[in-house]
Amino acid sequence: DRSPSRGLGDVYKRQPHNTAVLKSMADNYHLPAFQVIPTIPLKVLNSSENIAKGSQNFLDSLIAQGVASIKWESIHIEMLTKTTAYASNIGIRYKTNGEAFNKAAADFIVLKTENEWKIATLILRSPEPFNNLKIKREVSDFFALYLKNYNRAMADDDPIPHLLAASEDLNIPAINISQKGEFLMLESNQQIGANTKGFIFQLKAQGASDINYDKTQIKLLTETSAIVSNVASINKIDGTALMKIGVTYIVNKTVTGWKIILRTIHAPNNILNIK
């Protein structure tokens, strides 16, 4: 329904101090969560009040430009596990006279907690596909170096120095979501190294010798953000696969280079169908 009487501006203005609308928007987020907006530093959303304030500024800006409603043009959802999913959408913003104002797009990693789905990371972007071979190669090279540090950790009796080197590839803070849907905010390089140490020793005890990527999908979202989904093969000394796991990442380019801001583990057959 594109009727202005049922549009965004009407609903927004009808609420006393906009409390109901803003609370509803804030309730959609996991706490904490990340918001990625082009040209703006990564934002950590850690309170409902901050989210409500940001949402109010966003709605005020749209209404000031004459936007009355937003309708989804398309929604795409891929399940990673029973409790994690990737979603993307394109929305059309309409003016009070019913004419289209513009389009906007967003990508999400969402997490199910206590029977409710919550946004763990939101990336705003242009609705037009973004392709740049040079930037895609940068992201690919970044993951090659990231994997090299893990393989050095696998080969060394003391994996900690290499895990600390690999931890430099993660943003501080970063979000880690296990295959069981356990959410962990990683807030230091030492925490990241310790978090991974047990996993490496467990693999080595099972006879693992190295890790390689069987398949990697990279989708650039903006010049400074991308989603990467891959299948990692953990191999024995004789070259046979011990196991395979799927991992999906959100990466963001900072002043010091590309950084992983979110990684979520899933089954290898749930690699995202993105390009």
Image: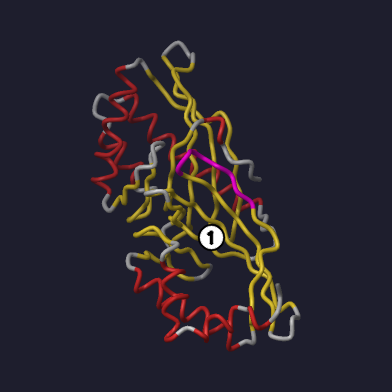
Question: Does residue 25 lie above or below 216 as drawn?
Answer: below
Q: Which residues are magenta?
A: 76-83
Residue that appears at 33% across and 30% down: 153
Viewer-closest of 1 and 38: 1
The one of 143 and 10 positioned closer to us in this rendering: 10
Q: Residue at x 64, y 51 (%)?
A: 76
Number of numbered callouts drawn: 1
Tell me the residue at 35%/15% (across/down): 207
SS for dot 1 = loop
Residue topped by disc 1? 224
Above or below 120: residue 162: above
Expressed as whole percent of the image width and height from the top left, the position of residue 29 reads 42, 61
- Does residue 143 appear left or right of residue 189 in this picture? right
Residue neighbourhood size for the residue with mark 1, other residues' Cα within 10 Å, grouped as few (<14), some (14–19), many (≥20):
some
Q: Quadrant of residue 190?
A: top left
Specify the color scheme: secondary structure
